[in-house]
Image (cartoon, helix red, strand yellow):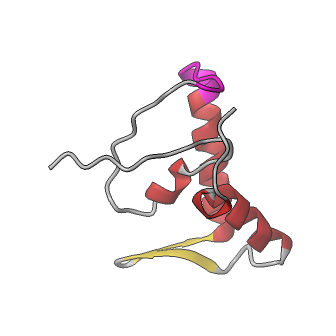
Amino acid sequence: MITTPEWHNASLIVDRNLEAGREEKVAVYCGDDEVTYGELARRINRFGHALKEELGVRREDRVLLVLDDTPSFPVAFSPRCAWAPYQSR
């Protein structure tokens, strides 16, 4: 099984902030966009569900995600995921 350093796991960071009552606090700033911890948690859950249920991704599967630097980026750092940066340019 892959182990992920704690600081690579966005959902763990989000969960800790939710437990501390910070659901409405801003978690991500990107230009004019602001995403709260609560909204980020909902996005992480939707993303994980889509990977599993709609695409059939299972534990230990490898998936390449190409993402811009937007509020969607931290959603990819879900639990039990390991990541590695990829520079295409």
Quarter of the figure that contains the N terminus: top right
Q: Which image quadrant for residue 65?
A: top left
| Pick the front one: 79 or 75 | 79
Q: Is residue 28 left or right of residue 32?
A: right
How many numbered tags mark residues here?
0
Q: Position of residue 75 (x, y in %)?
A: 54, 53
Residue at 53% over, 21% down: 55
Q: Quadrant of residue 53?
A: top right
Q: Residue furthest top?
A: 56
| Secondary structure, magenta segment, majority class | loop
Q: Residue at x 65, y 34 (%)?
A: 49
Q: Does the magenta run of residues contain 77? A: no
Compared to residue 73, the image places residue 20 above or below, namely below
- Vertical placement of 65 versus 72: above or below? above
Foreground pick, 18 / 83: 83
Q: Nearer the viewer, residue 83 or 29?
A: 83
Up-down relation of residue 26 to residue 88 (above or below): below
x and y percentages locating residue 24 in the rendered image? 69, 77
Residue 38: where, in percent of width, then height? 69, 65
Query: Which quadrant of the figure has residue 36?
Result: bottom right
Q: Nearer the viewer, residue 48 or 77?
A: 77
Residue 79 image offset from top left, x and y in percent: 68, 46
Magenta residues span 52-60
Q: Residue at x 51, y 58 (%)?
A: 74
Image position of 5 (left or right of 70): right
